[in-house]
Image: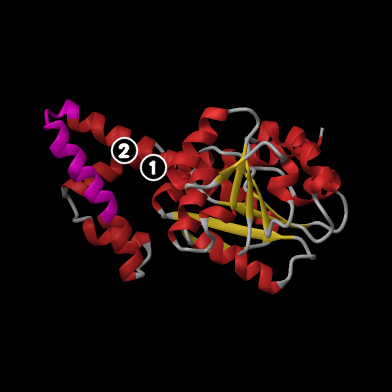
Amino acid sequence: MEKIACIGAGSMAESIIEGVLGRGLVSPASLFVTNKQDHQRLQYLKEKYNVQTTYDLDEILTDASFILLAMKPKDAHEALEKIKPFVKTGSLIISVLAGIPIETIENTLGEGVKIVRAMPNTSAAIGKSATAIAHNHLVSQEEVEDVVQLFSSIGVTAVVHEEKLDAITGLSGSGPAYIYYIVEAFEQSAKELGLDEQIAKTFIIQTLMGAGEMLNQTKKEPAALRKAVTSPGGTTEAGLKVLESLHVKEALVSCIKEATRQSKKLGKEYVK
């Protein structure tokens, strides 16, 4: 990867920058970053990662192997219009913009532009993202492999059809927030039960990590692991009965479906 141009300098952009530099996929001298107007943010990235920062779009986009769109979705239209004169036929665009379809980006930038959509999540900050990748027909298999390599630097990846990206946005894109919400409930219960705050936090985190590793290492279905912990008449069964009575599973399913609908809505609103 000779040069990466990053349009947007928020937390997701920083996570990707840290990942690709950490894996040695590109040198700081070949990683260019810009944003709408936050000079202070660019200065921070320059000082921390030694990347190149500029508001000169000709400098940042000329000869870029990848052009990464990482601005806020609400700023996408303005940003795409600004970079359009500098994007050439054959340029490879990577968008991490939630909800905005490939076709919409094509319509703005013009025909002949190679476009990849990627849906990472905020766990990219610690190299634990789950990133789904989709692309238009102009992207070669070799280029897909390069993009997979890029996002593998911040976690696991999978190539999917674009129509699945909204569901993945609802599931894993927004998913960390739902896990944190559950942790908040764990912490509240621990506090009400009089447990030491630090001990409770340590045990909650270890419980989550342990359950995740059990799913990963044993390859058993979650239902099987749940049943293995649930003794008739025991404490786990008592707790699960409360969750069932409050329809918690149904609420979580509805939560992810609603996030998926919102992702689709954002894409339609951009088109308007």
Q: Which residues are magenta?
A: 191-209
Q: Is residue 232 above or below residue 58?
A: below
Q: Is residue 26 left or right of residue 95?
A: left
Residue found at x 54% / y 44% = 13
Quadrant in which the N terminus is drawn: bottom right
Query: Which amino acid lies under the numbered mark 2 shown in the image of this protein?
Result: Val
Q: Is residue 108 left or right of residue 48?
A: right
Query: Residue 88 sits in which quadrant?
Result: bottom right
Q: Tell me residue 16's x, y (percent).
A: 51, 51
Q: Which mark is residue 183?
A: 2
Residue at left 52%, top 63%? 25
Report whether 260 appears left or right of 267: left
Q: Are marks 1 and 2 in contact (CB under 8 Å)?
A: yes
Query: In the rendering, at what x and y percent does residue 11 appear?
Result: 49, 39
Occupied quadrant, residue 128:
bottom left
Q: Position of residue 225 (x, y in %)?
A: 29, 61
> Are there few (<14), some (14-19), or many (20+) residues within 10 Å of tag 1?
few
Q: Which residue is mark 1?
A: 179
**In the image, residue 105 above or below residue 230:** above
Secondary structure, mark 2, is: helix
